[in-house]
Amino acid sequence: MATRAARDKTGLFGRDVLSFADLCPTEVQALLDRALAFKRGDPGKPLEGKTVALVFEKPSLRTKISFDISVHQLGGHAVYIAPQEVGLGTREPASDVAKVLSRYVDAIVCRTFAHSTLEELAQAASVPVINALSDREHPCQALADILTIREAKGRLSGVTVAFVGDGNNVAASLALAVASTGGAFRIASPRGYVLPQSVVEQARSVATATGASVDLMTDPKDAVRSADVVYTDVWTSMGQESEAKVRLAAFKGYQVNTRLMALAKPDAVFMHDMPAHYGEEVPAGFLDNPKSVAYQQAENRLHAQKALLAAVLSG
């Protein structure tokens, strides 16, 4: 577990962020405020003299580039470590990697297949560890998502977010994020692909304190009806390619298209964390739909992560 040194006003200095649930509602709002301030102007150099290791088991476009640029724009130095260079759990134990990196760098950002690998890193590291994606959660994506919703709708409390598709890592972090900020989260998934019960219970526990709600459905129409935000993700994620044929059959009828969007509020926005599999969860070119904020959402990865890095590394 990372050292919890003197804390800044958000309480995040020196802390690990492995789950969106590691952030309390007050900390979330402070991060969003900071992200918006960074987006509007020069963030300064809060990471000057700091080095961040980007340990990636899974390739990425948005996550790799946004973290690399975030560290650079904050005055720090990022070191990208590719899968073949580290071999987490194969070439050497994740705990040894964590102990060595802790002597070189000021933080570890890890994108990994198994959440247990991330937990092992955090347990052994003496520097903060940030989850850049695991099979359980994608908290940095969710932080960018709610930043985008706040920009698009002007608020987060009372906003209804409908997620259509797999109850995967992206949906899990989004459920926790919406619960944390007082919104209504609805997710429509086919049987066998629902949000894990542990996540549902965790999100509903948070929701009792914020006035939020978390509802599970099977019919996309029920989820989208009168929603402020409609969100979807790929039906087959990286590492699930062998399941692609079965998943295509299971998710038939779950495509977000103009007919489904018509059931949402007239001013509803469409979100997708990308990459999109056109012809599956969305029709060809749907990210260019006038209601889409998907590219704004992608940009906000940069600003949200800058806010998180600055809070964790400089207070």
Image (spheres, rainbow, N blue to C red):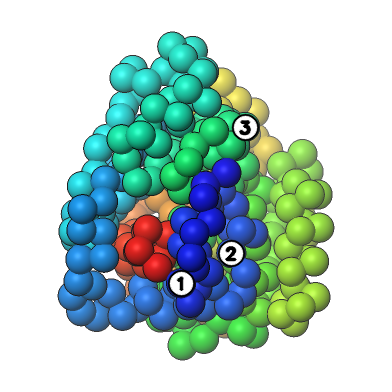
Image coords of residue 289 (percent x, y): 36, 67
Check disc 1 and report its element: helix, strand or loop.
Answer: loop
Residue that badge 3 annotates: 116
How packed mark 3 is, by other alpha carbons closer than 10 Å (few <14, some 14-19, many 20 or more), is some
Under mark 3, the amino acid is Ser
Q: Which of pointers 1 and 3 indicates the residue nearer the eye?
A: 1
For residue 9, say whether it is visible.
yes
Q: What is the secondary structure assignment of the residue under circle 2? A: loop
Q: Amino acid at mark 2?
A: Leu
User: Spatial distance from mark 3 to mark 2, Cα to Cα?
Assistant: 19 Å
Mark 3: which secondary structure?
helix
Query: Label 1 crowding class (10 Å Cα cut-off): few <14, some 14-19, many 20+?
Result: some
Quarter of the image for the N terminus: give it: top right
Decide which of tag 1 and tag 3 comes sooner along the chain: 1
Image point (48%, 65%), residue name: 6
Pick the front one: 283 or 103: 103
Classify 192 as above or below 229. above
Give the percent coordinates (x, y) of residue 311.
41, 65
> From what the image shows, is residue 85 above or below residue 10?
above
Name the outermost residue toward the top: 91
Give the Cα distance between marks 1 and 3.
29 Å
From mark 1 to mark 2, how far is it between C-alphas?
14 Å
Q: Residue at x 68, y 38 (%)?
A: 250
Q: Name the kind of residue labelled 1 in the image.
A: Asp
Q: Nearer the viewer, residue 287 or 186?
A: 186
Check disc 2: other Cα within 10 Å, few if <14, some if 14-19, many if 20+.
many
Q: Nearer the viewer, residue 233 or 257?
A: 233
View extreme (bottom): residue: 154
Name the residue tied to disc 1: 8
Which residue occupies the foreground of this view, 2 or 59?
Answer: 2
Q: Which residue is mark 2?
A: 23
- Picture quadrant where residue 302 is located: bottom left
